[in-house]
Amino acid sequence: MDELYLQDKLPKLGKPLAVLVIFKLLKIKNAAALAAFFTLHPHIRRLLRNHVQAAQKDPATVERRINKSSNLISAILLYAGVSLNPKIPKDYIVLYLIELYYGSLNTPRSPFLVSPTTARRFKLSNYSENGWVHWLYRNKHYVLFPLIYAQLLSNYLTPTQYKLNQRYLSSTIKNWMLNPIWRNFHMGRTSKSILWLGLGGAFLKHCALLMAYFLLSEVKSKILVKYFQKSDMKQAFKDYVLLCVKKTKSIALFVYGISLTSMALLAVTLPLLTAGGIIHKLYTANPKLFIKNYIKFVGAGSALLAMLVAVPRSEHLSAAFFNGINGYLLNLIVLSKWRILKENHPWFTILRVGTWERIESLLLSYVVWETMNLNDTIRDNDDADKMAECRRLQDDRLIRVVDRIMT
């Protein structure tokens, strides 16, 4: 009897020891803490349940607090494992997890309240459907995309002494998207020109790349499904190609529309910098800051104008499309700005590199802790109205990984 009791109460250490040995053989830094994070969570939760008394609280509240406490202990173990480990790109991982958690898993539309006392005010269900909060959330892409494009264009066009913006800008965006378009635009103090032949060639290349991407990325959902359903494959293939052509045309025209609008605005407004008056005084007072903000203004105006023209005419330029693009580009911009600051800005030399490593590790651990809390929330859900959202979340890769660690 005592042996069975002890066997139920004491954790089985075979798996943690095996993972620890593997991490040691791989020479992973802070192997003990990482091994504990990946393997000890069920045992930590079991120990807390065995030693925490319900007292005067209701069982649901006690269970939720036990779950959050065990998740917090695991998050602390993760912090101990990744902190001061330079081989882990924590800044990139943190941004990816934040965008995934708040942009997909636990959005303002989500029906789940991970923290019932504080999360309610951040949910759309707490506000009137006809109010300004819902309207702003539905149309947020009209604000976010112009701001993001403005920053992207400023990073690309603003001249800097050490070219830090160019150095940290995504090479894929710079070499495959911006360079082919903007190398055909030339602007000096007395002349402006566009190489239309080169711009047309770049447009055709981008169309070919987009077409190839759409044909390959959606073949499973559009063609293979029809094949197994024994549908008319000839008609299905025609519809599939036509859909890819429409998507390619919509996106390519939108991208080039923004670029041409930006070029036109730059060409039209450039004489204002040297014509005297208030604008000229602002320009001469701080040329670098003025040019940076000037290009941002041009970029934001061009993007908003292009969206107002193109979005109502194309079903493929949807809010979901812009939300995906915004999340990806925002990650790149924040990551590049953060690396520029912490590696080059004189203010940041006050703190050592290890301090920034700890800050990034703390943010990483916090997002993982929140994801664990969300996983507990969806596992404990018994509301039939929320089952569809539960299944969507349980199919997410991050939730599956976290659930595997927690069980």
Image (cartoon, rainbow, N blue to C red):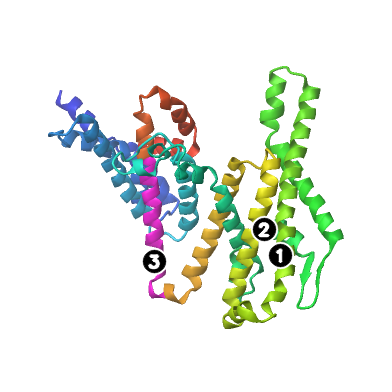
Residue with the mark numbered 2: 302
Measured Cα–Cα span from mark 2 to mark 3: 41 Å
- Magenta region: which residues? 349-372
Q: Does label 1 or label 2 sit earlier along the sequence?
A: 1
> Which residue occupies the foreground of this view, 310 or 108?
310
Identity, as a three-letter code, of the amino acid under mark 3: Gly
Q: Does label 3 or label 1 sit earlier along the sequence?
A: 1
Residue with the mark numbered 3: 354
Tell me whether the residue at label 2 lies in contact with that at label 3, contact meaning CB atoms closer than 8 angstroms: no
Question: Looking at the magenta stretch, what is its main secondary structure?
Answer: helix
Q: Any magenta on residue 354?
A: yes
Tell me whether the residue at label 1 lies in contact with that at label 2, contact meaning CB atoms closer than 8 angstroms: yes
Where is residue 17 drawn, in percent x and y? 34, 42
- Residue 315, compared with residue 188, is above or below; it is above
Tell me the crowding category of disc 3: few under 14, some 14 to 19, or many 20 or more residues within 10 angstroms, Cα based.
Answer: few
Where is residue 324 drawn, in percent x and y? 58, 45
Please give the label number shown on residue 12: none
Residue with the mark numbered 1: 265
Identity, as a three-letter code, of the amino acid under mark 2: Ser
Helix or strand or loop: what does disc 3 sit on?
Answer: helix
Quadrant in which the C terminus is drawn = top left
Where is residue 204 drawn, in percent x and y? 82, 50
Residue 366 seen anywhere in this rendered image of the structure: yes
- The image quarter containing residue 288 is bottom right
